[in-house]
Image (cartoon, rainbow, N blue to C red):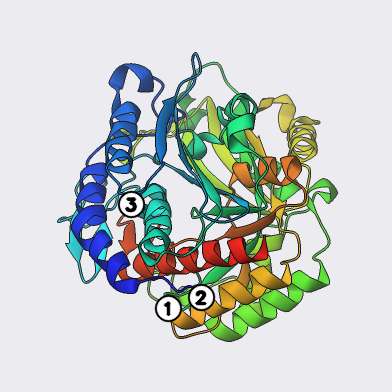
Amino acid sequence: MAQADTRLVDAVWQDEILPRLTEYIRIPAKSPHFDERWADNGHIDEAVELARQWCEGQPIDGITVDVVRLEGRTPVLLIEIPGTGPGEVLLYGHLDKQPEMTGWDPDKGPWTPVMADGRLYGRGGADDGYAVFASLTAVRALRELGAEHPRCVVLIETCEESGSYDLPPYIDALADRIGNPALVICLDSGCGNYDQLWLTTSLRGVAAGDLSVEILTEGVHSGDASGVVPSSFRIARRLLDRIEDPATGAVRLEALQADVPEERRRQAGEAAAVLGDGIYRKFPFVDGAGPMATDPVELVVNRTWRAALSVTGADGLPPLAAAGNVLRPGTTLRLSMRLPPTTDADAATRSLTAELERDPPYGAKVSFRPAQASGGWSAPALAPWLSEAVDRASRAHFGQPAVAMGEGGTIPFMGMLGARFPSAQFLITGVLGPHSNAHGPNEFLHVATAKRLTACVSDVLAAAARAA
């Protein structure tokens, strides 16, 4: 029974992957949603070229590496590796990044790679620039052992952080080359700790957009107008209260609800037993602050199967240094509504729009402009061979059993692949664990976990060939 050569995996990571990831972090390859001039700026192309060169240099017989470009769309990197055994597997990752974000430590920054305490800091290393390097290293480890593995197709996109809107045309255009995978491996997810292999069993969807409230055509003196003209901010608060209980954070709209399957509740209980209060202690609360609840099971369910609202941006609010005594003409808030995995994102967006725009208080001009609607995903039941393989790999390389838990984020690709390959098995996992802070300041890659995860993927590929 093949088990990855961890010495080879460690050596490739130290000698080849970490130097390339360090270069990759320096590239501000922001997703097209955050860089409208991405094509002119060339950062995404630079990141793809860095990965392409490394992939082409790998000592894997028969490998083909192509950069595929459809007109007007971000490129994808497509790597095909012929199998030494039966079966087909699709491995997925992305190279586009979230924007800079403020709050980085003085010695760190989004485009400034820093290695400290076994962590590689910088934007995109863990989310998830490492994926293409780990995928090929997992195959290479099996080739070095002379072990069988299925045909492997590695698909790396550059639009994921924008909702993967460029990806469906590529899936169609590359259908013959992708084939009909029996297993899909995605390395863009999270882990509850750095002590074992974590399987993502579900992903929430998202409905995002801008709520705009206008009450005046221009700002006026607050001493003259307050008490006569309602504040646009207060009107926005009233509108938000329609969709969210301000005391509990519970989302009120029926269209944004979903029943939690019993299997997912069981998995939430098992994950909570492993994590304990670590489920919330990983977050950087200010002194004296705490979570919305203290029951770990409820918190796991909250972040994986319940809708939740965040206000992620605002316009119409001047910075404090420029904030005079003016009753502002309007307020615009960027809303991000996380959705249960099985909720229809388009229906949820329609419900949000209707509820926010109906009967505007004081006759204000109110509009909700949808910006993103991505459905969630719930994994099919694990086949016995895959369940055994992931647990065996976790015990071999982490020394602990594997754990299954949903994730609160969105990977649009999973819903697409689930619909296209309904009989496929899915291994969704990743290295985004406690404090790794994807999308925020001080994002880091936990290097030891990435090495162990690479070895686990190698073992699962060998098991996939045996199962096929």
Q: Amino acid at mark 3?
A: Gly
Please indicate whether residue 448 sits to the left or right of residue 262 in the image.
left
Image marks 3 and 1: residues in contact by CB distance under 8 Å: no
Image marks 2 and 3: residues in contact by CB distance under 8 Å: no
Mark toward the start of the polypeptide (3 vs 1): 3
**Image quadrant of residue 75?**
top left
- Circle 2 is placed at which residue position? 393
C-alpha gap between disc 3 and disc 1: 22 Å
Secondary structure of residue under mark 2: helix
Image marks 1 and 2: residues in contact by CB distance under 8 Å: yes
Q: Nearer the viewer, mark 3 or mark 1?
A: 1
Mark toward the start of the polypeptide (2 vs 3): 3
x 79%, y 32%: residue: 354
Please indicate whether residue 179 sits to the left or right of residue 456 in the image.
right
x 68%, y 40%: residue: 416
User: Residue 134 or 216: which is nearer the viewer?
Assistant: 134
C-alpha gap between disc 2 and disc 3: 23 Å
Residue 368 at x, y = what percent? Answer: 67, 29
- Circle 3 is placed at which residue position? 125
- Circle 1 is placed at which residue position? 397
Secondary structure of residue under mark 3: helix
Q: Give the number of callouts.
A: 3
Q: Residue furthest left?
A: 107
Assess disc 2: are there few (<14), some (14-19) or many (≥20) residues with their C-alpha within 10 Å of its C-alpha.
Answer: many
C-alpha gap between disc 1 and disc 2: 6 Å
Residue 71 at x, y = what percent? Answer: 50, 13
Secondary structure of residue under mark 1: helix
Please identify the quadrant where the C terminus is shown.
Answer: bottom right
